[in-house]
Image (tube, helix red, strand yellow):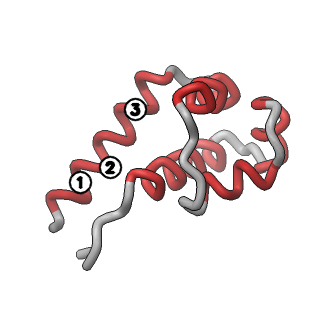
Amino acid sequence: MNDTPNTLKQIIGKTVKAIRIKQGLSQEDLAHKCNVDRSYISMIEVGRNEPSITKIFELCRGLKITPSFFIKLIELEYDRDREQE
């Protein structure tokens, strides 16, 4: 059980990372597909940067998933965290 629930930034980051790894992509690969620097992907994945809606759409295009699917994953994890409070 978590003492403190994950923030949305952390949930977004760990979701991006999980999908990226599942697809066998490096941070560099995903960054190239999204026309951003690898460090930007890293900052998202560790929860230090929160992507805008525009960037979420670009990330989803790079990950070959729909934004609605991505948001659903975020929502499920967010709800799971809140249930553990």
Quarter of the image where one finds residue 4: bottom left
Label 2, label 3: how far apart the Cα atoms are? 10 Å
Residue at mark 3: 71
**3D distance between C-alphas at marks 3 and 1:** 14 Å
Tell me whether circle 1 and circle 2 mark residues in contact (CB < 8 Å).
Answer: yes
Q: Is residue 60 left or right of residue 79?
A: right
Quadrant in which residue 73 is drawn? top left
At 54% from the left edge and 59% from the top edge, which residue is drawn? 47
Please report the residue visible at 35 percent of the width from the left and 32 percent of the height from the top: 72
Vertically, is 77 above or below 65? below
Instruction: Look at the image and tell me in which quarter the N terminus lies.
Output: bottom left
Q: Would you call the spot at circle 3 few (<14 residues within 10 Å), some (14-19), or many (20 or more)?
A: some
**Tag count in the figure?**
3
For the residue labelled by badge 3, is the local secondary structure a helix, a strand or a loop?
Answer: helix
Q: Nearer the viewer, residue 6 or 1?
A: 6
Q: Quadrant of residue 45 in the image?
A: bottom right
Q: Is residue 26 above or below residue 6?
A: above
State the residue at coordinates (38%, 42%).
Answer: 74
Q: Residues within 10 Å of mark 2 (few under 14, many from 20)?
A: some
Which residue type carries mark 1? Arg
Percent position (x, y) of residue 41? 70, 49
Residue 28: where, in percent of width, then height? Answer: 84, 47
Residue under numbered circle 2: 77
In the displayed structure image, the side of residue 62 where residue 39 appears, left or right: right
Secondary structure beneath disc 1?
A: helix
Looking at the rendered structure, the kind of residue marked 3 is Ile
Tag 2: amino acid: Glu
Name the residue carrying label 1.
80
Whether label 3 touches label 1, CB < 8 Å: no
- Picture residue at 51% right of the left edge, 20% below the top: 66
Q: Which mark is residue 12?
A: none
Residue 18 image point, x, y percent:
55, 50
